[in-house]
Amino acid sequence: MQASTPLLTGRPRAKKMLRMSSSDKAAITIGLLSALCIGSVLYVARTIALPYAAPVATSRSNLSSTILSELPALNFTGDLRARCTESYFVQTLNHFEAIPDTYSQRYFVCDEFWQQSSSGPIFFYVGNEADVELYLNHTGLMWEHAREFGALLVFAEHRYFGKSVPADAARHLQHLSSEQALADYAVLLGHIKRSLNATSSAVVAFGGSYGGMLAAWFRIKYPHVIDGAVAASAPVLSFVGESPPANLTAFSQLVTYDASPAAGSAANCAANVKRVWDVLFDAATTAAGRASIQDGLGLCSALLSEDDALSVPEWAKTSFVYLAMGNFPYPSSYIMNGGSGLPAFPVREACKPFAPTFPLTEAGNFSLLVALRASVGVYYNSTHDQPCYTRSAPSNESQVDADFWDYLFCSELYQPQDQGIGDMFWLDVHDQTADAARCLAKWGVTLRPEWATTVYGGRKALRASSNIVFSNGNLDPWAGMGVLEDLNPSVVAVRVEGGAHHLDLMFSHPLDPPGVKQARKEELKHVAKWIQQAKATAA
């Protein structure tokens, strides 16, 4: 909503279709939520040196925007963990049965800007499927505005991720669910407020991608615990059972939009990318063709079978998907999990090799393969030191995190996707029966396609809720499954023109487009209103 999930393989398909279940494909794509969530993000915006000043006690409620603009700049360089207190809370393992089992949930409290004496608010990051340190270090919207609100920052870790893993977790996955995680957050907040004598402090939740969904659901399920939620790039309308139904082709179509002239990419890019899949599928059927694929793409090892060769398109497609999510207007290591950096507007860079017109000849087809090699290199060779491709992920991913996310996908967060309709990819339509078989075989769980809509209520529940801001960028592939229109006067949509995946939550950057700056202003306006409402209610 980020993302290192492993490249998965699955059931065989006919020629020109990947040997991969749609559950695998969708798990990879929803796993892109982990591009935010699993990445160790060395965010460029945060590393710009700013003159440091000691914290000044201020409050948005009693300072004009002019005075706020005159406050000394703050420095958010370095590891922000040093400015926080790391703690562990003895958390109930199963909130929905009266059993004594517990686990240790990690969280960070950052209080340098908190105005405790005036019941300053709590900004609560709703941890998603990764180590919470990542969010602590890179959710700039919370850090940069804590001073003006006098806010306490809390970053809570999602159960089964990071260091909040129950004992023998792999054998007790039944306790891994979004519902249990939300209950964790509600209980943890109660503990923090009591411990810090902050029971009258308003609470605003922040989250991006899966964390954005959790933030919105937190407000729906526990409106007495949090006073509002900023849900960035949250595909809350992506589940089966929505009315109207989820747009299952939106993700691939928005990746294609990023590769179009409208988004600044080369005019021929999408058409040439569409053509290269046919070249790959045709070449996969013969030994000579497979050798051509290896040579053209610069693969480290030979493709020994047609099945092996048919996995190449999904590997190549993954690069376009990640680059679209991280299509930021400045260099960033966000999508690369901190291991290396992507250029500004990386999709444009990936499209440059596809700018020419390639003849419809054998030589032209090989030139397309060479172009694909250069294109995927923006992602797979971002370090510029790989002599050949191993077809493994280029990032510091956690296989355990990826597996736990796949369990969530199978057990409750089923988000099927289709492609090949109005986009630059090959035709591949999800197969729910095959998805169910894979989930049962791998995890021993029954696929529940409509569970997320049943338990959280989808669009209908959102209309009945309050105090939620949904932000979506027009460059973000997940935007097509998010809330794009106001659902009521206080459940509102903020369009982020020029924004990729939850760019508005990041630290500010000199190259931020106007749309991102405006989105942040809108979000903060609502945050201020929620806090004032909470104070008025408590008075």
Image (cartoon, grey):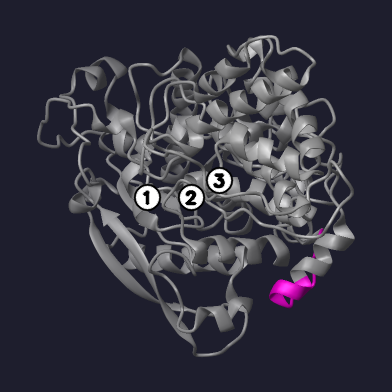
Residue 85 image position (x, y, % from top left): 22, 60
| Residue at the (73%, 78%) spot, across then down | 444
| Residue at the (52%, 26%) spot, across then down | 327
Q: Which residue is labeled 2 in the image? A: 37
Give how far apart the Cα atoms at labels 3 and 1 are. 15 Å
Magenta segment: 440-449
| Residue at the (74%, 40%) spot, across then down | 288
Q: Which residue is labeled 3 in the image? A: 212
> What number is the disc on residue 134?
1
Tell me the crowding category of disc 3: few under 14, some 14 to 19, or many 20 or more residues within 10 angstroms, Cα based.
many
* Front position in the image: 385 or 234: 385
- Give the overall secondary structure of the magenta segment: loop
Residue 26 image position (x, y, % from top left): 72, 50
Q: Quadrant of residue 198?
A: bottom left
Asked whether the residues under the numbered discs 1 and 2 touch, taking CB atoms below 8 Å apart as contact, a structural biologist would say yes
Residue 332 image position (x, y, % from top left): 39, 31
Residue 232 image position (x, y, % from top left): 54, 38
Q: Which element type, helix, strand or loop, lies under badge 1?
A: helix
